[in-house]
Image (cartoon, rainbow, N blue to C red):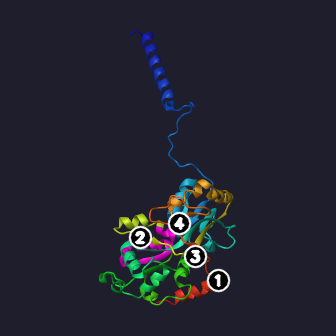
Amino acid sequence: MSGWRAGLVAALVGGVVLLAGWLIPRLGDDDGEAASTSTSPPSTDLPALSCAPELDAVCRSLASELGTRAERFAGTDPGGDVVIIAPVADIPDGFGDPVTVARSPIVVTAWRERALVLGAHCGGPVDPGCLEQAYGEDWSALGGNAAWGAFKIGLADPGRTDGAMLSWSLIAVGGVPAGLDDGLRLRAEDTGALVEEMVLFGDSRADAAVAPEVAVAAQLANAVGRGGRLEVFYPASGPWVDYAAAGRGRDSGRLVERLLESEVQQLLGPLGLRPAAGEAAGLPDGLGAPGAPAPGPDEATRTALLEAWEGLR
């Protein structure tokens, strides 16, 4: 091939290669701009969500939806730009203006097999009054299997979180029921850890527990996976936990406002948490209709309840 023909062929081939290099990144891109291959998450200036322990699963889901990160609220000022979601009473003084964004009733939960026996013994639902009949008793006296041993209850420390305080108040506001100290076999730092440990150890540690509904909801599927099933019982009237959001930082107000938007509120039901207003939709299987909200204990009653807790063996 002569020199001029070889040069022409090389030029044509080079042109084709350049044209392919220009076209390939644009295939499937309607606006003609180069497609991005980056997998990095979009940047955000929103503060982190710092949530009460029983809201861990809720917090992770909301943070993903809102484009920020989630962390656990330890009960003290977390520092930095952050929005806390926790019971109103747990938010540090001076940390913004708390706005209620969700609610959760205090419930009784029990392993299904034990709940059926308790219900038959009490002749009704497994409520705080039914639990009083079980404290200090062996299962054989309650109509259950003697191999189950004594009735065991699980509770969280009311001195640490308001969810635990309201749970304790449901069963001890009129005084510590007889036999409860003998049956209190599972004590946890918070209500999230309480239900998690109840599921982790099964009925060897607790036959029943009292906690906010959202803490139980987080473990319903895990309980089935461990060979059991948690039943949830709602008192006819009892305290509810009001979960509030309060923030600090330039965009904290915007994030709190987002938490109150209807599309975000609609995400709460499937996570086992009830919206600030209106009915919850899409609650997990196993949750039901709550009882009437009742006022929580006043400061004098809270002091008495803490003293009663500290007096348990």
Q: CA distance from mark 1 to mark 3?
A: 12 Å
Q: Position of residue 234 (x, y in %)?
A: 50, 73
Q: Which residue is mark 1?
A: 299
Q: Seen in the image, is 248 located left or right of residue 16?
A: right
| Separation (CA) of disc 2 from disc 4 | 19 Å
Camera-side residue: 309 or 174? 174
What is the three-letter code of the residue carrying label 4?
Answer: Leu
Instruction: Say which amino acid is labelled 3.
Output: Asp
Amino acid type, mark 2: Leu
Marks 3/4: CA–CA distance = 13 Å
Query: Which residue has dot 3 on it?
Result: 162
Q: Which residues are magenta?
A: 191-216
* Kind of element beneath mark 1: helix
- On residue 55, the disc is 4
Residue 189 visible, this orientation: yes
- Nearest-to-viewer mark from 1 and 4: 1
**Relative side of 231 to 45, left or right:** left
Task: Find residue 4 and report its horizontal and vertical position in percent.
Answer: 45, 10
Q: Mark 3 falls on what kind of element?
A: helix
Q: CA–CA distance between discs 1 and 4?
A: 25 Å
